[in-house]
């Protein structure tokens, strides 16, 4: 995967392992898979627990899919994807984290969690993100929208997250690659802001 990538260092509890990557991908469904594979490769190289790799891949897939489904592309018909991960081997999960962000050309609505009917096939993307991420939010300006999420991670040697924490979603049970044009992962929200004025949102 092309893009800016800061090489990881050989960390310990005082000097954790770090990876930063930022890529610009085509505004196309195939970019969901490309971004997910790149993230998983980086996390596995850092020995992140398999269940959290799956969670992170699902969060990234939902954010990229939402951008492709609901927003305009960036100049060059592209979408921006980046992640930063810091892992302290052997430390508690709270000491290791992953931040994922997806940037697009914006839309007329602000991303927010919707509440689809039980029989509805779509509308659950940001609900999944909210459940798996410790924090998530949106930053908007006149020309771009960035949706970000932060997850706690742990190395394989630590044994994963506290079992009392919120449960995870089975990635195999969710079709993250399909971009159903009729699915709605957002509800419309009229923004009353002046051009160039930033706006933010978070979990509702």
Image (spheres, rainbow, N blue to C red):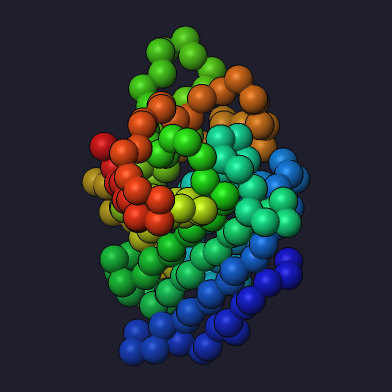
Residue 169 sits above or below residue 123 on the image:
below
Q: Residue at coordinates 54% horizontally, 18% vertically from top-left?
A: 121
In the rendered image, residue 25, in percent from the top left (x then y), is placed at 70, 57
Quadrant in which the C terminus is drawn:
top left
> Measured along the vertical axis of the image, is residue 95 above or below residue 8?
above
Query: In the rendered image, is residue 58 in sight?
Result: no
Name the spot of residue 201 as percent of width and height, x first: 31, 46
Percent of width and height locating residue 12:
41, 87
Q: Quadrant of residue 96?
A: bottom left
Res 14 quadrant in image: bottom left
Which image quadrant is residue 97 in?
Answer: bottom left
In the rendered view, does 188 fall on the left or right side of 7? Answer: left
Which residue is found at the position 66% from the left and 31% from the top?
179
Q: Is residue 203 left or right of residue 50?
A: left
Which residue is rendered at x = 41% and y = 83% of the image?
A: 16
Residue ID at (72%, 41%): 29
User: Which part of the image, by quadrant, shows the N terminus?
Assistant: bottom right
Residue 165 visible in the current orientation: yes
């Amino acid at each position: 995967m092309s893009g800016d990538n800061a090489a990881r260092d050989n960390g310990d509890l005082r000097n954790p392992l770090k990876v930063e990557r930022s890529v610009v991908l085509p505004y196309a469904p195939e970019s969901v898979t490309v971004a997910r594979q790149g993230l998983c490769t980086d996390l596995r190289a850092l020995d992140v627990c398999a269940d959290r790799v799956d969670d992170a891949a699902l969060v990234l897939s939902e954010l990229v899919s939402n951008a492709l489904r609901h927003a305009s592309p960036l100049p060059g018909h592209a979408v921006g994807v980046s992640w930063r991960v810091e892992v302290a081997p052997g430390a508690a999960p709270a000491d290791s984290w992953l931040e994922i962000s997806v940037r697009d050309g914006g839309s007329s609505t602000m991303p927010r969690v919707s509440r689809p009917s039980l029989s509805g096939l779509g509308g659950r993307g940001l609900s999944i993100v909210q459940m798996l991420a410790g924090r998530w939010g949106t930053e908007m300006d006149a020309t771009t929208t960035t949706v970000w999420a932060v997850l706690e991670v742990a190395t394989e040697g630590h044994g994963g997250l506290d079992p009392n924490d919120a449960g995870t979603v089975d990635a195999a049970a969710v079709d993250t690659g399909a971009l159903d044009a009729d699915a709605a992962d957002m509800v419309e929200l009229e923004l009353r802001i002046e051009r160039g004025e930033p706006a933010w949102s978070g979990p509702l």
